[in-house]
Amino acid sequence: MLKIIQAIAIALVASSLQVQAQPYPNQPIRLIVPFAAGGPSDVLARAFSQKLGEDLGQPVIIDNKPGAGTNLAAEFVARSKPDGYTIFLMMVGTQAINETLYKKLSYNTVKDFAPITLVASSSLMLVANPSVPVKNVNDLIAFAKANPGKVNFGSSGTGTPLHLGGELFNVQAGTDITHVPYKGAAPALTDVLGGQIQTAMIGTPAALPYVKSGKLTAIGVTSLKRSPNAPEVPAIAETLPNFEVELVYALVAPAGTPNAIIKRLNTQMSTILNNPEVKTQLASRGFDVQTSSPEQLGAYIKAEVTKWAPIVKKSGATAE
């Protein structure tokens, strides 16, 4: 009987060692996107996920988890097993904002995620339904002031950069445009296209096709300079000096993910993002490729938390 028990124990240990020895990855990887399908984050994820899966030898499956100002997705990833099979396309500004915006968070943006790499950045575009009689920033300011409390703007959720970008516009322009939050940029985009809301701040990659087709009016971009992908659209900063809101995307994993896996993902993503064809593809969609070491990304996330805290407090925005 003792020999049988010993044999079983040896077999279990051998099996465990065999599992541990299996190279990463040996099963599909879930890429969690914190916004609905069709928004800028989703567009970006789909631009690199297939190639990442091909390079790793396992499919990378996109899992859209919108809601709670990205906290639903962030909490899911923070609580996931740190084995490299759940990764998160983080919008850094949003997560940094949430640290101050929400009174209670079940995760910590700095401590509960393992940085992998920066991925890309993009500006926002302030757009209007063509039925709204505005063509530029000055038109919108005049229209909003002539119709106090009757003009609105959509965003991807309370406290997101899209929301605070609109509030920043109100502060600098002296307007009172009403915020209408959505569970992601895609629903906000749908409603401004349909005329349910008048204006919205949308990621340039998602808004640009509709501007070019005439389905939306471009008021301005939120970068300090005009976007090379839409040079005919002025920067809001040309009218409101120093106005700037930028979306920065990064790839992270749950804290505790082995360094070897983090390094593998960082290396593969760096190769993919520096491929000229990928760069061109992302540029055509309004993204500027960004890469980094895990350490550089970690420092950037910390800096963003520090940067946004006073801005959120000054805006008076809070969320439960």
Image (cartoon, grey):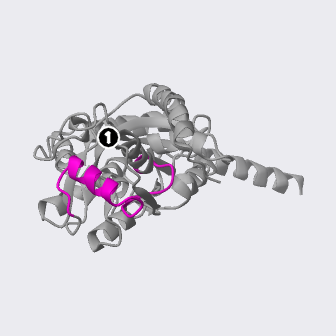
Q: Residue furthest front?
A: 146
Write the residue at 49% across / 38% down. Answer: 261
Q: Quadrant of the N terminus?
A: bottom right
Q: Is residue 133 left or right of residue 222?
A: left
Asked whether the viewer can see residue 296, the reply is yes
Taking depth in this image into account, of 106 and 100 the one nearest to the observer is 100
Magenta residues span 133-162
Which x, y percent locates residue 255? 60, 39
Name the residue at 23% across, 38% down.
239
**Mark 1 highlights which residue?**
120
Q: Is residue 216 left or right of residue 257?
A: left
Quarter holding residue 116: top left
Name the one closer to the observer, 262 or 55.
262
Q: Nearer the viewer, residue 76 or 268?
A: 76
Up the image or down, 258 lies above or below 43; here it is: above
The residue positioned farthest toward the left in the image shown: 232
Question: In the picture, which quadrant includes the C terminus?
Answer: bottom right
Left-right relation of 172 to 76:
left
Q: Amino acid at mark 1?
A: Ala
- Residue 160 drawn above or below residue 193: above
Q: Going 56% across and 47% down the picture, which residue do you hit?
A: 317
Magenta stretch encompasses residue 210: no
Farthest right residue in view: 1
Mark 1 is surrounded, within 10 Å at the Cα level, by few (under 14), some (14 to 19) or many (20 or more) other residues, namely: many
Give residue 19's position: percent from left, percent from top.
59, 49
Q: Position of residue 57 (x, y in %)?
A: 36, 52
> Residue 98 falls in which quadrant of the image?
top right
> Helix, strand, or loop for circle 1?
strand
Q: Is residue 155 magenta?
A: yes
Q: Is residue 37 visible?
A: no
How many marks the image carries: the answer is 1
